[in-house]
Image (cartoon, rainbow, N blue to C red):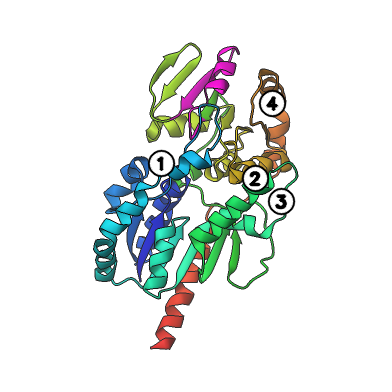
Amino acid sequence: MKIIYGVSGEGLGHVFETLELVSRLKCEGHTVKILTYGDRAFSFLGPLGASRIEGVHLEVTPKGDVSIVHTFFKNLHIVGFYIKNWRRLKKEISDFEPDVFITAFEPYTTLISHIFRKPLISIDNQNELLYIRKPEGVKWFDFKITQWSTRLCTWGAAYYILKSFNKITPSKNNLYYVFPIVQSETRKMKPIVADHIFLYLTKPNHKLIEVLKTMPEKCIVYCGGRIGVDGNITYRASGGAEYIEDLRTCKAIIATTGFSLIADAFLLKKPYFGVPLKNQFEQAYNARILRKFSIGEFSENVKKDEIESFLKHLPDYRTALEKYNFDPADEETTLISILEKIKRDQLQAL
């Protein structure tokens, strides 16, 4: 089958997931055309022949809050891009003659799939948020904004693959709850516990770094491509063998609460201290996973005593992690089976 695969370029979780799934899809004989946006996403997916589009990037204030107003104005150029490039992109997709579309929380792919009247598969963890009640302590507005944006990005999909750490019986026939995919490199790892803390920050968090500077801990930080050494803090560029090795050997993770890295933590049995981006409900919800499964803690305004308490209880978190098992190939297996079903339905319709 010919597949258009749209990938969100905000963060790298969807990007790394796409690398795994596209590799599997090609092995199954499918042809895949990728659409994505953002420099970091394109640096990984461009070599696979991805076409560059435009999409929303979150704007974060110096305090670490997601600013809805700044995000809105910083992304106004997107409208101009699609006015200028609409015909070109539509022709590019038409020439490809797609049989099915997949969206990894990328709204243009959702829209164009309906224009071409082809089946759409949504793969994300965000859609789970449409089937839960607002958690305590979460602002109603943040919760609703997340739900509305989720519906906008994935509306009208024929199938929804919902990545979740909770195995739930779906309420609809087109919903599939799956354990999140983990990169093949990560699956092959034999984790050990060294003396450093692994930090991955989607956006700079100066307050957190200042707290860590006051502690006798070796910290390796991946954030925005910064490189260098500042006391006990070592900054490294994202990607590559160093990233994998630092993750494999760390004694704990401190990071913003992206879904993919939490999945890595479950697989590698790494305790996780979450620092969710403020005013972003998805990050707040993901952070509560850490506490729910007793594999770590979280705080939006990190204090030294909170990190000290987290580090003190690392053995307890590791014990909880040892009790949790999941299938890192669950997501790709489910996607392949859905594509087979769509192919059968299309052949029967001829």
> Distance between the Cα atoms at labels 4 and 1?
37 Å
Which circle's residue, 3 or 1, is located before the other in the chain?
Answer: 1
For label 2, the crowd category at 10 Å Cα-Cα, with few meaning under 14, some 14 to 19 and many 20 or more, is some
* Residue 310 numbered mark, or none: 4
| Viewer can see residue 24 | no
Task: Name the residue tied to disc 1.
Answer: 74
Q: Residue furthest right?
A: 136
Name above or below for residue 63 compared with residue 284. Answer: above
Tell me how far mark 3 sits from mark 1, CA to CA.
29 Å
* Disc 2 residue type (three-letter): Tyr
Q: The N terminus lies in which quarter of the figure?
A: bottom left
- The tag earlier along the polypeptide, 3 or 4, is 3
Q: Please name the residue that numbered disc 2 is placed on.
A: 285
Identified at 45% across, 34% down, the residue is 244
| Amino acid type for the residue under numbered disc 3 | Lys
Residue 278 in the magenta stretch? The answer is: no
Residue 134's label in the rendered image is: 3
